[in-house]
Image (cartoon, rainbow, N blue to C red):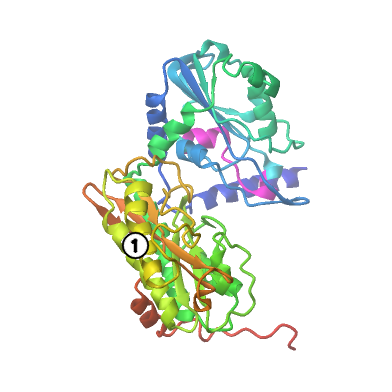
Amino acid sequence: MKNITALLGFILLTFALNAQNKPDDFLSSAFHKERRALVREKMPANSVAVLFANPVRNRSNDVDYVYHQDPNFYYLTGYTEPHAVLLIFKEPQETPEGNTDEIIFVQPRNEMAEMWTGRRLGTAGVSEQLALNTVFNNTEFADYNIDFTKFDKVLFYDFFNDVRDTNNKADLYDLIAAFKQKVNYPSQADLELEPKANNLDMETLDQIMKDLRGIKTKEEIDLLRKAVDISCIAQREVMKAMRPGMSEREVQGIHEFIFKKYQAEYEGYPSIVGAGHNGCILHYIDNYKPEIESDEMILMDLGAEYHGYTADVTRTIPVDGKFSKEEKAIYDLVYKAQQAAIEACKPGMNIARDLDMAIARRIINEGLVELGIIDSVSQKHLYYPHGLGHHIGLDVHDKGNYEYLEPNMAITIEPGIYIPKGAPCAKKWWGIAVRIEDDILITEDGYELLSDKAPRKSDEIEALMKEPSPLDAFILPSLGEE
């Protein structure tokens, strides 16, 4: 027994020493504390906001997906572990522990669990490292005396009922069940009969988070710049390495290797690597074509997630390094529309109305008419079926308001043209798919192009693709060789 205890103690000491090697460019505890204060400031009088950590998702049998914290929860706490709940009070509350304006319940330290699945902060670690005022183990939430009926508003996100119940008696499933009991959460029948019969508010909190997360702080912009730079460098290296005969998955692997090389923890979303006709599938994530042909283009929509913040950069390149006449015509048209929309970015503009409909979509429709692909600019078609852009940040489609652009908003500008096989136009256009996507920071009087490290002009792409790649000499043996 002494040996086991000593071993566990050694493991926990090792965890503590390893924690000291954590990079120093994560968001600070002061950032998260300030965000909580701003939420509190925006909350209605006599209200409480309740936020839950993300659930653990099962991949297969006894294997779970790599855990990723709920972006709102991370934004307000910096806590990256599961099975937790945060309460923010508009006004300080009297508790047995004294007055407090926030309480967080987190998973407790557990020597055996930490030996298998990694270190936990525990209550002391959360208090010291994340600067939260009042911290309890999640095992205490069910019995903790909080009278939710005294609040005029209980702000929270409604539940999707997709959380597993595990053997852990204070897991997220149990935390949600305890909360529902405490607030007298209505059944579906109750909601249909009298949807506003209580103090539960499942709308206000989301608007508060949109208002805050849509405007980035300097700390956030610094992390976003790194994520975008990493993604652009990956695009550049793939342009140099691209050769006919490569597979879509190999191209994906080069991108993601470079992400990891720069210590990006994740991909911000499933990588999209579509060659030829696959590029016409907007969210194509199979990436399984084993051999890309020389007469195809490849559309690569990938973004590194660095310390929580994700880029979203798309480039479309010719596999053999040279755009055909038709490919160049479509590519240059998309570039023209994108560049015009980017140059119009400034505070007060509306993405859909001012940048997309009045600029990008108009230019694309006029160009498609000139190329003979559609008959008139008013003709309905699906060659450009998506919107022009969205917020980026802790989510690739980040929370934010879309009515008007404001300084320190980070958005994408991403027009595209997709002409699938069988489309009602000349066959020479079939299979051509182009999307160019860049990340833009709105400034006080205009914009800053964050993703300028990856070339966008067709001639610049062709020039870069002629350069040698360090991967040219990386040749693996065939499987099955002795």
Left/right placement of residue 108 relative to residue 46 reads right
> What residue occupies the far top of the structure in this picture?
150
State whether the magenta stretch is mostly helix, strand or loop: helix
Kind of residue indicated by mark 1: Ile
Closer to the camera in the image, 33 or 294: 294
Provide the secondary structure element on which disc 1 rests: helix
Q: Which residue is mark 1?
A: 363
- Extent of the magenta region: 114-129
Q: Is residue 44 magenta?
A: no
Left/right placement of residue 220 relative to residue 287 reads left
Left/right placement of residue 340 relative to residue 197 reads left
- Seen at 39% across and 29% down, the residue is 37
Res. 92 in view: yes
287 vs 171: above or below: below
- Seen at 33% across and 66% down, the residue is 336
Give the percent coordinates (x, y) of residue 268: 51, 55
Give the percent coordinates (x, y) of residue 15: 58, 49
**Label 1 Cα crowd, 10 Å radius (few <14 / some 14-19 / many 20+):** many
- How many discs appear? 1
Give the percent coordinates (x, y) of residue 392: 42, 50
> What residue occupies the far left of the structure in this picture?
445
Q: Is residue 120 magenta?
A: yes
Give the percent coordinates (x, y) of residue 322: 43, 83
> What residue occupies the far bottom of the structure in this picture?
482
